[in-house]
Amino acid sequence: MSERVFDDFTEFYSLTRPMTEEQRDILMQNLSLGERRHLTKARRVEGWDDLLIRNQIDLLLDQIKDEFDEDLIFIRIQVLSGHLRKVRKSFWAHVNDVFASYSMRHKWHILEGIVAKEYKDDWVLLVPTKRSDNE
């Protein structure tokens, strides 16, 4: 039995943290099949999958904020506090497209409790889900 290069995924990630995700993927692909299986299982068991996905979502939130000058977390807080928020349909469609591939449990902190209602021409009104159900 050969020795492992990394004891667990925590060690792998701590040593490769300065690398880009692409560099980390290349390194992973260059490890032996047994080492890759070991790290893949360790990543899942140690709970890294959720953290890595949350990091990806946070990066997407930052990109949307930079591109559209809209803070989705702030929008959600406003809407859930009872303030209606008018946004462009194209912006809201983009948001939904960007996060479509993620499960709701990973994006709940952004979109949960918000529903878009048709408003005028190029606009939608973001309202709390509970308010939407009562209308």
Image (tube, rainbow, N blue to C red):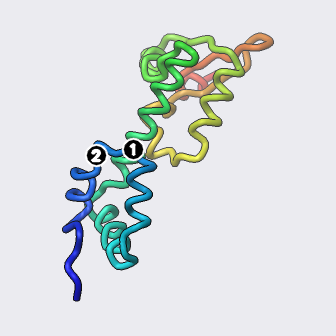
As shown in the figure, which amino acid type bears the numbered disc 1?
A: Thr
Q: Quadrant of the N terminus?
A: bottom left
Q: Residue at x 55, y 22 (%)?
A: 131
Disc 2 on helix, strand or loop? loop
Residue at (37%, 50%) from the top-left corner? 50
Dot 2 amino acid type: Arg
In the displayed structure, 130 sits above or below 79; it is below
- Residue located 31% across and 54% down the image: 48
Q: In what element is the residue under mark 1?
A: loop
How far apart, in angstroms, are the residues tagged by discs 2 and 1? Answer: 8 Å
What is the total number of numbered labels drawn onto the structure image?
A: 2
Do the residues bearing badges 2 and 1 touch, measured as CB atoms within 8 Å? no
| Residue 42 placement (x, y as % from top left) | 29, 66
Q: Which residue is mark 2?
A: 17
The image quarter in which residue 88 lies:
top right
Towards the viewer: 37 or 57: 37
| Marker disc for residue 35 | none
Residue drawn at 56 percent across, 38 percent down: 99
Q: Which of the labelled discs sits on residue 20, or is there none?
A: 1
Quarter in which the C terminus is drawn: top right
Q: Where 118 sits versus 97, above or below?
A: above
Residue 7: x and y in percent read: 19, 68
Residue most extreme to the right: 121
